[in-house]
């Protein structure tokens, strides 16, 4: 085992972690006759379920009319949970404001960009900035937390449900006013605002604050990208304040030890700030069938639903030992959109173990029983409409036995070969700039695919205002694919990382813009030029009229896809590879520059799954599986979790056929209890976990 592979975990990432592997389920007592409650809870306990989540869409059960409160419904249910020794995560119901509220107060509703209001009848029809809605939310959270907070069955609180799900952009009148105040506070003067937004272009200059609005419909969808970038920052700030308002109230009433969380992971939210300042831990909603929505071909892509692991890498960057609030247990679909196949035998367990392999110590399946009415009638749970035992229930019971066997893994850390750097400025800029998006999206997917296929797991590290050198130094190799937006503080941090001995890998389009998304009038790569030792005087998308462009690296041909920066090495910079195609054949495509004790590799293109392992090998990234297992990355996903001197090796087969691999040393199988080594096989959708 290579002990140089390590991982720095900031102390402030989470205040709560599960002390044992815990299995739960999402339950909706308001959907069922009270005659079913006791039998359902008994059946859950018999299955191994010890925690349920309730209440996220049940505002009317507490406040059926304005200022009329009835706590008896959940009183009865929570008391029954206590009798059955079932623990509860209680949710604030702010994701679905009631009809009596929205009919009386249209100003609480969100709107489309063209001003048409979203009406009652789905969910997430509210806006974050209506003072009226915020007052109603404060009230329902206060009433719920003050009444139920001391209940012995409750162990945690979930805020809202999937912030920014369904709707991630907000155009209500309240949001318009709040956005104006947001940018006024940020820029203080109209001159500063006009400069930050490049407002002189197309005569967009503002001469009065009342002229400043949210993005509005414009010809050719030509919204000012700098205003749109600030708009995404505004949404993140609005969601944060909404979450913090609720968390602050709950803290006044919760019992000692009860946690606060939220679920999901959706665009235009600063999840890291929300986790640090509002929550005790983060929970994710894991639906691996959605992986096919990434444009993958299930018939030909060897990764298939392994793409869900890419999302879980993101979650782990927010909260290293996270929970799964909704783990897929059946086919997903709404009556009006989305459809999917039922999990094949073994997949339910496989998907849950995928979450555990990446850091989850709490698995809550969605949902206990499929709802026979409403929009989600095809979002299938463990039980189907008929309420009979089925193969999914049997598989959940079997998973529980496996989960119990994984008790030694609880709170073990994920082990990575390298770190992938990201920041919210660049993540949100991707949605304002299609050039940035095309390049970065391609690289993001290819980096994940290349890492999976080469058995080189990685962590994601978000660079923030308060990021410290210690956040980076646990990784001998860092990859920052396309930091189009760059500032002096970030550049200084990267320089310090390299000087102390790290290897940094950068891709094309690095250092192009400032924090407002305005292209710097500097030689590219801008603020990073001293670090990379390269000058870029010419650049281009690869042309579909030409053959694919490659680079020659000591006889190895590397794909150079999507976009090519033509690199000119400055003194002291070595050329490692040169382009072999297009008008810039023979020019530098990959360079290396040593600074202090470290070095920077500058790749002039987007990344590919073929190029990534070669770059990482040259950079010195080491697989944590060396000496443990021989396995083809196309056949299985490998992860390693570590606690003290104990290592836990996960081997996951996402294929509908048997796969083989070889254990290179004796290991203890946590599922069978046997010592094993040598050639092994996994059945279709099978999984194994070994203590090393």
Image (cartoon, rainbow, N blue to C red):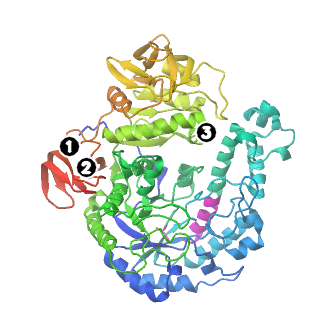
Q: Is residue 7 visible?
A: no
SS at mark 3 in the image = helix
Of marks 2 and 1, which one's residue comes earlier in the chain? 1
- Residue placed at 58% from the left, 21% from the top? 524
Residue 157 within the segment the image draws in magenta = no
Callout 3–callout 2 Cβ contact below 8 Å: no
User: What numbered label is drawn on residue 647?
Assistant: 2
| 59 up-or-down from 287: above or below | below
- Residue placed at 49% from the left, 75% from the top? 371
| 650 up-or-down from 430: above or below | below
Which is more toward the observer, 440 or 281? Answer: 440
SS at mark 1 in the image = loop
- Left or right, 208 with reference to 652: right
Mark 3 — residue? 429
Callout 2–callout 1 Cβ contact below 8 Å: yes
- Residue placed at 42% from the left, 60% from the top? 323
| 4 up-or-down from 668: above or below | above
Question: Where is residue 638 shown, x and y percent of the image?
Answer: 29, 47
The CA span between labels 3 and 2 is 39 Å
- Label 2 packing within 10 angstroms: few (<14), some (14-19), many (20+): many
Range drawn in magenta: 242-258
Query: Which mark is nearer the camera, 1 or 3?
Result: 3
- Residue placed at 28% from the left, 40% from the top? 624
Residue 253 within the segment the image draws in magenta = yes
Q: Quadrant of residue 85?
A: bottom left
- Left or right, 314 with reference to 662: right
SS at mark 2 in the image = strand
Q: Is residue 627 visible?
A: yes
Mark 1 — residue? 628
- Left or right, 467 with reference to 360: right
Q: Quadrant of residue 48?
A: bottom left
């Amino acid at each position: 085992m290579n002990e140089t592979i390590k991982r720095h975990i900031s102390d402030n990432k989470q205040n709560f972690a599960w002390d044992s592997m815990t299995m739960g389920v999402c339950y909706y007592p308001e959907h069922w006759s009270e005659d079913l409650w006791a039998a359902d809870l008994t059946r859950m306990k018999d299955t191994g379920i010890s925690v349920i989540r309730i209440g996220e869409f049940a505002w009317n059960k507490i406040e059926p009319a304005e200022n009329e409160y009835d706590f008896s419904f959940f009183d009865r249910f929570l008391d029954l949970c206590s009798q059955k020794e079932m623990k509860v995560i209680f949710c604030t119901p702010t994701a679905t404001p009631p009809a009596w509220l929205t009919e009386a107060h249209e100003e609480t509703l969100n709107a489309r960009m063209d001003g048409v209001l979203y009406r009652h009848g789905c969910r997430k029809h509210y806006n974050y900035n209506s003072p009226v809605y915020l007052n109603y939310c404060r009230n329902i959270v206060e009433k719920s937390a003050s009444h139920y907070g001391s209940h012995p069955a409750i162990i945690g609180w979930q805020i809202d449900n999937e912030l920014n799900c369904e709707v991630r952009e907000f155009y209500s009148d309240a949001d318009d006013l709040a956005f104006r105040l947001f940018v006024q506070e940020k820029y203080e003067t109209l001159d500063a605002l006009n400069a930050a937004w490049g407002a002189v272009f197309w005569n967009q200059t503002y001469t009065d604050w009342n002229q400043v609005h949210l993005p509005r419909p414009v010809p050719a969808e030509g919204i000012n990208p700098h205003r749109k970038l600030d708009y995404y920052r505004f949404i993140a700030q609005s969601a944060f304040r909404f979450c913090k308002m609720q968390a602050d109230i709950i803290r006044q009433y919760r019992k000692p030890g009860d946690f606060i969380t939220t679920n999901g992971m959706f665009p235009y939210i600063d999840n890291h700030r929300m986790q640090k300042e509002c929550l005790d831990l983060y929970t994710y909603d894991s639906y691996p069938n959605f992986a096919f929505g990434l444009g993958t071909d299930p018939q030909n892509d060897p990764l298939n639903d392994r793409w869900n692991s890419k999302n879980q890498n993101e979650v782990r960057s927010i909260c290293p030992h996270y929970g799964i609030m909704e783990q897929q247990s059946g086919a997903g679909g709404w009556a009006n959109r989305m459809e999917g196949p039922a999990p094949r035998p073994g997949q339910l367990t496989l998907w849950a173990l995928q979450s555990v392999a990446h850091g989850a110590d709490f698995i809550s399946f969605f949902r206990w029983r499929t709802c026979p009415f409403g929009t989600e009638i095809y979002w299938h749970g463990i039980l189907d409409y008929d309420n009979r035992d089925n193969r999914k229930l049997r598989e959940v019971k079997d998973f529980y036995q496996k989960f119990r066997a994984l008790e030694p893994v609880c709170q073990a850390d994920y082990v990575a070969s390298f770190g992938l750097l990201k920041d919210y400025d660049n993540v949100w800029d991707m949605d304002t700039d299609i050039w940035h998006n095309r390049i970065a999206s391609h690289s993001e997917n290819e980096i994940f695919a290349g890492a999976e296929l080469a058995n080189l797991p990685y962590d994601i590290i978000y660079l923030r205002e308060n990021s410290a050198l210690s956040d980076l130094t646990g990784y001998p190799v860092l990859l920052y694919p396309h930091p189009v937006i760059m500032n002096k503080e970030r550049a200084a941090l990267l320089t310090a990382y390299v000087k102390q001995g790290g290897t940094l890998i950068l891709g094309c389009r690095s250092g192009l813009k400032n924090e407002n998304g305005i292209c710097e009038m500097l030689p590219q790569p801008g603020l990073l030029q001293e670090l990379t030792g390269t000058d870029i005087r010419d650049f281009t998308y690869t042309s579909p009229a030409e053959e694919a462009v490659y680079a020659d690296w000591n006889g190895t041909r590397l794909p150079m896809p999507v976009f090519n920066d033509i690199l000119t090495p400055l003194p002291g910079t070595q050329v490692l590879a040169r382009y072999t195609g297009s008008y810039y054949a023979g020019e530098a495509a990959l360079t290396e520059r040593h600074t202090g004790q470290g070095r920077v590799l500058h790749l002039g293109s987007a990344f590919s799954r073929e190029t990534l392992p070669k770059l990482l090998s040259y950079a010195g990234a080491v697989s944590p599986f060396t000496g443990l297992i021989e396995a083809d990355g196309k056949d299985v996903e490998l992860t390693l979790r570590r606690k003290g001197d104990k290592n836990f090796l996960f081997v996951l087969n996402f294929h509908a056929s048997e796969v083989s691999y070889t254990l290179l040393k004796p290991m203890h199988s946590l599922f069978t209890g046997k010592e094993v080594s040598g050639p092994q096989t996994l059945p279709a959708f099978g999984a194994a976990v070994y203590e090393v």
